[in-house]
Image (tube, rainbow, N blue to C red):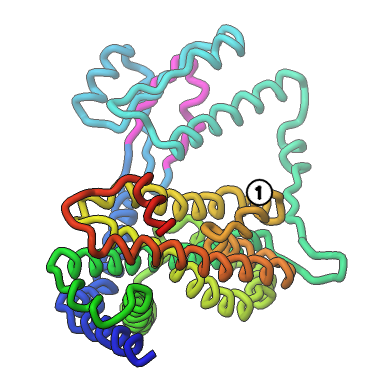
Amino acid sequence: MDKLLLIIKREFIARVRNRTFIVMTFVSPLLVFAMIGVIGWLVSLNKDQIRTVAVHDESQYFVSAFKDTKNLRFKDFSSSPLDVVKDSVVLKKFYGLLYIPKPHDTIDFVNSVRFYGENAPTIEILNTIERVINNKLTETKLIEKGLDVDAIASARTKISLKIENFSGEKSSKLSNIIKIAFGGVAGYLLLMFIVIYGNMIMRSVIEEKTSRIIEIIISSVKPLQLMLGKILGTSFAGVTQFAIWLVIGGILMFISVFVLGIDLTGANPATTAVYSEARNLEQLQPILQDIYKLPLMTLVCCFFLYFIGGYFLYSALYAAIGAAVDSETDTQQFMMPVVMLLVLGFYIGAFVVIENPHGMVSVIFSMFPFTSPIVMLMRIPFGIAWWEIAISVFILFLSIIGVAWIAAKIYRIGILMYGKKPSYKELLRWMRY
């Protein structure tokens, strides 16, 4: 036990005293916020750009329906020949040219409208143009049928569904977005932590193996103690770094939002939707109720449980891979299955859980130990029975014992093997020793 504590202390000190570790601990939050600021600035530039579209309307019926907006201008060139207008649009560097022919019948007309431009127009501009033409055509047909357009327009009613469960608790229309945001952030943080610090363990093993220091260390401690010491020491260093990131990130967010007045949600459609919905005072209360009703305590507790379980599970694999090879370039064939399992968990959470958090696929992958840390964290905000979480955690920690035993077998032999990249067949043979 004393030797294990000594290894943990040594690994922890070696990590936190590393110059790269210190620089990244304090620089990474600054880089992240700088990147968010640049993205927000670029998005604002894109929104402020004014685009001009020339309109060549041979029918002389639709051009008046196009109204200028904040970022979109329409210029009428209907009196000039189409070829001349095309040349003029290119010369003046307009965004594009909308060509509307004379309508002979509705079907031919609908298939004859064209948009000319150097590049494909944005979805927003296409929707704007199509909406104007569709509304105008609809209005024309109604008039032709002798219907009162104003009466029909005044009869149109827009409803806003109020959502509540059978016990009377109200919910907002953005309830699922809120749940996805909380679960997605938790799953993504866990994924990044496993990848970053798992690779750190693997590189540490490779460095000691190539420098032959491992031969001296292994004469004093057992391989299993050395592997566990590396995992624990690196994890403590990682937790320390993560805590510092949270503190610095919180300070930077406070300064950005409340001191500098920077909108950090401008580049994110989901948060923008929540914000725009929340500006309506009627909708603000259900949104706050949705956040209040989230199992936040369960999510926080499970985050630490799955963080510990997932980290130890994958760290054992990273340590075994580091012991099996002599350089980082040789790790690719063994890293692919590990990375694929992590990516699989994130994509199952991002696509399947969002669609049906209580479906069979979501349940299976939230129990499978190599994907459960990410998938289950994404399911928890949607309301999961405690026994499902208990079974998932039990399977995860039981799997850690099995994976650690297998990894220790590979680690015990691999750390003293040099000059040859082992195959999967050889790794299976090492497990039997």
Above or below, comparing residue 263 to residue 7 in the picture: above
Left or right: 277 as drawn, with respect to 24? right
In the rendered image, the residue lying farthest to the left is: 211
Report the front residue among 416 and 277.
416
Report the front residue among 16 and 229.
229
Judging from the image, what secondary structure is the residue with disc 1 in? helix
Would residue 220 be counted in the magenta stretch?
no
Q: Residue at x 34, y 80 (%)?
A: 229
Image coordinates for residue 330, horizontal then vertical, percent? 23, 50
Image coordinates for residue 24, horizontal then vertical, percent? 22, 73
Above or below, comparing residue 37 to residue 419 in the picture: below
Q: Which residues are magenta?
A: 52-68
Residue labelled with disc 1: 361
Residue 254 in view (yes/no)? no
Report the front residue among 211 and 154.
211
Q: Amino acid at mark 1?
A: Val
Above or below, comparing residue 46 to residue 287 in the picture: above
Q: Residue at x 46, y 13 (%)?
A: 101
Residue 141 in view (yes/no)? yes
Task: Report the number of numbered marks.
Answer: 1
Instruction: Classify residue 242 by image quadrant.
Output: bottom left
Would residue 65 be counted in the magenta stretch?
yes
Q: Residue at x 23, y 78 (%)?
A: 219
Above or below, comparing residue 56 to residue 334 in the picture: above
Left or right: 381 as drawn, with respect to 324? right
In the rendered image, the residue lying farthest to the bottom is: 2
In the rendered image, the residue lying farthest to the top is: 104
Label 1 Cα neighbours within 10 Å, binned few <14 / some 14-19 / many ≥20: few
Left or right: 178 as drawn, with respect to 316? right
Q: Residue at x 41, y 48 (%)?
A: 337
